[in-house]
Image (spheres, rainbow, N blue to C red):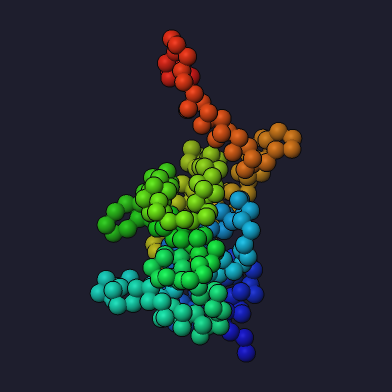
């Protein structure tokens, strides 16, 4: 008899992985809602656009699973919050490997892991960035720009997350492409924040809309590039030119308004 781990890892389709999580939620009452789907979709796009060299199927599954024992009741949070052995044992009982457990547990650096898995850095980024994009009872969501600034200069400022620079480039790419004057990430954020947290079917509908919208915009953007160029290289060249412009001294008699 196959385990849940074997079942969800063998399923490569993202939407069908969500179906597997719905089943687990009904059976074991795990934590799984719109916020998890939103973070995982951002991760899926990040790995795809920036061509991250990892097992994407494994990482997407970890993104859906890493917070599965989270509780939303304030009086229970301190008792069960991210308990290392509790999470490890639960995931192992579902059939997941020791490495998979380490990837999940390492997402927030609360527990020391001797050999931190590279994939934990990916979960760390989308966990913190995605959380800032969501409305909460005590605050409204941060904008994409604000969330990226906080992620870079506060949340991850004192840790060595190997993917942070690439993620900043990814955010720039996504926000550079607009739909109705909103960057792709901002549009996705607003759509997901309109849903109730337990509206999984609504989130899936938004995913299909997002897939179509992003694919169309990337195709259009690629068509605009000169022969032989690619999106990431062009972005890096543009950012390098901007940096040189910002650092270059103004000629006598000129002001910054003359550059606009």
Report the side of 253 relative to 217 (left or right).
left
User: Can you see residue 196?
Assistant: yes
| Outermost residue, right side | 227
**Which of the 4 quarters of the picture holds residue 128?**
bottom left
| Outermost residue, left side | 75
Report the side of 30 relative to 15 (left or right).
left
Residue 93 versus residue 33: which sits nearer the camera? 93
Q: Position of residue 204 (x, y in %)?
A: 52, 62
Report the side of 255 relative to 48 (left or right).
left
Residue visible at 62% across and 90% down? 1
| Outermost residue, bottom side | 1
Q: Is residue 91 above or below residue 226?
A: below
Residue visible at 39% across and 47% down? 153
Q: How many marks?
A: 0
Residue 194 versus residue 252: which sits nearer the camera? 252
Q: Position of residue 206 (x, y in %)?
A: 51, 57
Residue visible at 67% across and 35% down? 224
| Outermost residue, top side | 253
**Which of the 4 quarters of the picture holds residue 155?**
bottom left
Residue visible at 39% across and 54% down? 158
Q: Is residue 198 above or below residue 246?
A: below
């Amino acid at each position: 008899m196959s385990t849940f781990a074997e079942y969800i890892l063998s399923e490569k389709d993202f939407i069908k992985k969500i179906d597997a999580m719905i089943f687990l939620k009904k059976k074991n009452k795990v934590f799984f809602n719109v916020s998890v789907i939103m973070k995982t979709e951002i991760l899926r796009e990040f790995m795809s656009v920036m061509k991250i060299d990892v097992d994407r199927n494994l990482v997407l599954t970890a993104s859906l699973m890493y917070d599965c024992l989270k509780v939303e009741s304030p009086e229970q949070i301190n008792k069960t919050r991210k308990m290392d052995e509790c999470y490890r044992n639960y995931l192992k009982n579902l059939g997941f490997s020791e490495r998979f457990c380490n990837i999940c547990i390492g997402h927030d650096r609360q527990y020391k892991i001797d050999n931190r898995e590279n994939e934990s850095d990916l979960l760390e980024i989308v966990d913190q960035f995605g959380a800032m994009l969501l409305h909460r009872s005590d605050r409204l969501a941060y904008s994409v720009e604000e969330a990226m600034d906080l992620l870079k200069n506060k949340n991850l400022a004192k840790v060595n997350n190997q993917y942070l620079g690439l993620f900043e480039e990814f955010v720039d790419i996504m926000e550079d492409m607009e739909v109705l004057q909103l960057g792709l990430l901002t549009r996705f954020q607003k759509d997901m924040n309109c849903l109730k947290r337990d509206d999984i079917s609504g989130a899936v509908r938004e995913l299909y809309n997002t897939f179509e919208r992003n694919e169309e915009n990337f195709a259009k953007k690629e068509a605009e590039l000169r022969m032989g160029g690619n999106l990431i290289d062009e972005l890096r060249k543009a950012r390098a030119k901007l940096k040189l412009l910002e650092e270059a001294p103004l000629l006598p008699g000129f002001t910054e308004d003359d550059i606009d």
